[in-house]
Image (spheres, helix red, strand yellow):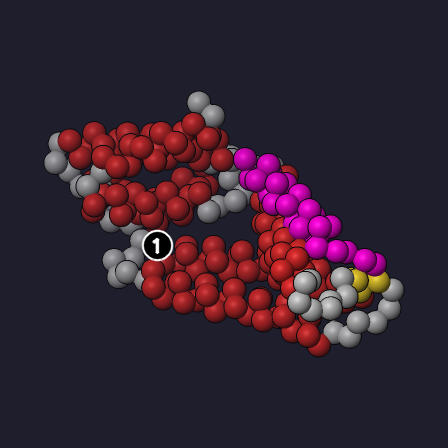
């Protein structure tokens, strides 16, 4: 089976787990899937095999600790050391897909704003090369860092009995707001100087849609 099919089957079979077993297995699953350097195919095969064993143990009235032991994170780290590494191309594709997603929403949002405000306000649709270049640089530099921060925050919350989802949501919200604030600051503080080119609402919206399509294609 391909990794995509294994993921679909995994999602279906996880519903058969008890709440307690599902919590342990879900943490284990997230921890492995967030190791971007690992082969996705091998990772999903191992996750499915472990799920099958866990379901069999559950039929016998056993809990997840029988399979994962007292240190599920340590067990996961042992497996990670054995799973073949994926090519760097997969990691690059993941980052590019996230950049396309962010750029797509920014460009599409700009196009919709120009379209909606056009009849009421006189807005210059020109785009400054210097200003847009600085903004794009901020996106290229900070988006990967933000993604890594999200991953690190989630990983640190796994395998803990205390529910930290709300705290993680706050951390993620703050980090995302900082990037958004930085982009807004670029838009407000950097002057419209130097060469520019026209980009009306249709061009901006079309470019945004193209970026979002590329995001979904790469993600698949």
Q: Report whether 30 appears left or right of 159.
A: right
Q: Is residue 67 magenta?
A: no
Query: In the figure, 31 relative to 83: above or below?
Result: below
Q: What span is colored magenta in the figure?
A: 197-220
Can you give x and y, in whole percent of width and height, for residue 92 in the image? Answer: 63, 44
Q: Secondary structure at mark 1?
A: loop
Vertical position of residue 183 compared to residue 92: above or below:
below
Q: Position of residue 73 (x, y in %)?
A: 35, 49
Residue under numbered circle 1: 158
| Quarter residue 169 falls in | bottom left
Q: Quadrant of residue 87?
A: top right
- Is 212 in the magenta? yes
Pointer 1 local density, CA inside 10 Å: few below 14, some 14–19, many at least 20:
many
Left or right position of 56 against 88: left
Q: Residue furthest right?
A: 195
Regarding residue 134, the answer to whether it shows in the image is no
Residue 95 picture location, percent across and down:
60, 48
């Amino acid at each position: 089976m391909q990794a995509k099919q294994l993921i679909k089957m995994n999602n279906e079979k996880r519903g058969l787990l008890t709440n307690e077993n599902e919590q342990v297995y879900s943490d284990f699953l997230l921890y492995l899937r967030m190791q971007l350097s690992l082969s996705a195919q091998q990772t999903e095969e191992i996750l499915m095999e472990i799920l099958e064993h866990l379901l069999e143990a559950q039929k016998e009235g056993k809990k997840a600790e029988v399979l994962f032991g007292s240190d599920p994170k340590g067990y996961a780290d042992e497996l990670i050391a054995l799973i073949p590494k994926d090519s760097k191309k997969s990691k690059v594709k993941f980052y590019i897909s996230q950049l396309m997603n962010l750029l797509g929403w920014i460009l599409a949002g700009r196009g919709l704003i120009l379209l909606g405000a056009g009849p009421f306000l006189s807005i210059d649709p020109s785009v400054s090369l210097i200003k847009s270049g600085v903004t794009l640089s901020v996106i290229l530099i900070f988006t990967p860092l933000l993604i890594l921060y999200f991953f690190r925050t989630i990983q640190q919350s796994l395998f803990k009995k205390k529910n930290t989802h709300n705290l993680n949501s706050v951390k993620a919200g703050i980090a995302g707001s900082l990037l958004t604030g930085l982009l807004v600051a670029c838009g407000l503080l950097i002057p419209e100087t130097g060469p520019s080119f026209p980009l009306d609402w249709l061009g901006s919206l079309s470019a945004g849609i193209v970026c979002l399509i590329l995001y979904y294609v790469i993600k698949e």
